[in-house]
Amino acid sequence: MAKLADWTGYARRFNGTVSAWINQAEAPKLLADNSQGVCNAIVTDWLASFRGYRSDRMKFIAKFTKRDNNGLLFNANIPDEYIAQQAQLSNELALHRAGLAKRLAQIEGFEKTGDVESANEARLALLFFTKLATGGIDCMRFVIEHSLPDLINHVKGLKGSGFIRLALTGNIPLKWYEFKDKPFGHAIGLELRPGRKIFHFIDANLGLFLFSTLDDLLAFVQQAVSPRFYAQINITKYVIYRYDIGLGGDLSPEEQAEQRRIDQESKAERQRQRQQLAKELEEIEKEVAEMMAGLAHDLKSEQENKSQPEHEFGEDV
């Protein structure tokens, strides 16, 4: 099973770091409640937080940094807020699957009757439903790839900055008998910020990882994550939901005002220190000038004394 020390090492091989450790697969409370859809909930929350302000990012990361009495991170940490949503998440997944099944059945029915126009309209409705139901209102567009290499090439071809919610769907192998007859679905996320050299990867089975180049992030996914997780599943679809950077992870207006206040106070303090230093330097220069004047006076007096003739001893009168 996933261990923080192992994945810290894997990330380091690709010049990356672990920003937050999650590991939902070994979260005892999550397993006890048999929650579904938590990975999607975490990615959704991550998207909202990281497309928000800098403080939103920090709050998200803080949720996954609980430590034990020895100051060590727990090997698995799913905050209660996600577990509390399990009924809602399960219902949302069920409704989504029912909506997909209904629309697919409509398309099939129109095709059987030869109603091409209605079939095409139903396909457009299916695309809109999928984009909105999974991607949400902020999703700009979505694309479907059918293999990991195609996914990697697609991501490499993207220009500019943005976020990706990646939905993985497929068939669970029969050897995993405890999960048979259950559809497989998983959600992960990517942040692509080449201008700032920020490339994040999040998977609730592991955590949030940070890289400074896209090549390092994708190599990590291909060589470290996929062989240990995704390659074990017969993934048939990689659905790429794309988003802009939102608020960009910068300071909020309130935070900017506070930062300006701090900057102004710091500027005023630096000005006060400069003035104090100038005053001290002025006093030092004055003391040095007085000392040099005193030395010059003493030297002049000594020279004047040396220029006067020496008197010989005369007779006593």
Image (cartoon, grey):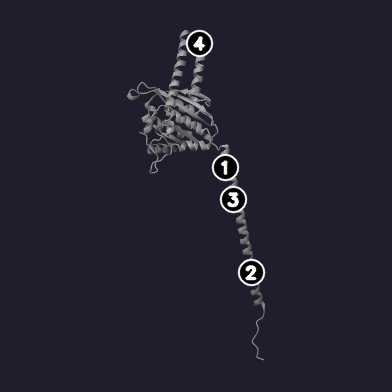
Label 3 sits on residue:
270
**Residue 116, labelled with which disc?**
4
Q: Determine the CA span between mark 3 and mark 1.
A: 16 Å
Q: Determine the CA span between mark 2 and mark 1.
A: 52 Å
**Mark 3, mark 1: which one is toward the viewer?**
1
Q: Earlier in the sequence, mark 3 or mark 1?
A: 1
Q: Earlier in the sequence, mark 4 or mark 2?
A: 4
Q: Is residue 251 above or below residue 98?
A: below
Q: Earlier in the sequence, mark 3 or mark 4?
A: 4
* Cβ atoms under marks 2 and 1 closer than 8 Å: no
**Residue 294, labelled with which disc?**
2
- Residue found at x 33% / y 25%: 178
Residue type, label 1: Gln
**Mark 3, mark 4: which one is toward the viewer?**
3
**Quadrant of the image containing the C terminus:** bottom right
- What secondary structure is found at the residue carrying circle 3? helix
Q: Earlier in the sequence, mark 4 or mark 1?
A: 4
**Mark 2, mark 1: which one is toward the viewer?**
1
Q: Determine the CA span between mark 4 and mark 2.
A: 108 Å
Q: Earlier in the sequence, mark 2 or mark 1?
A: 1
Residue type, label 4: Val
Is 264 in front, or is 91? 91
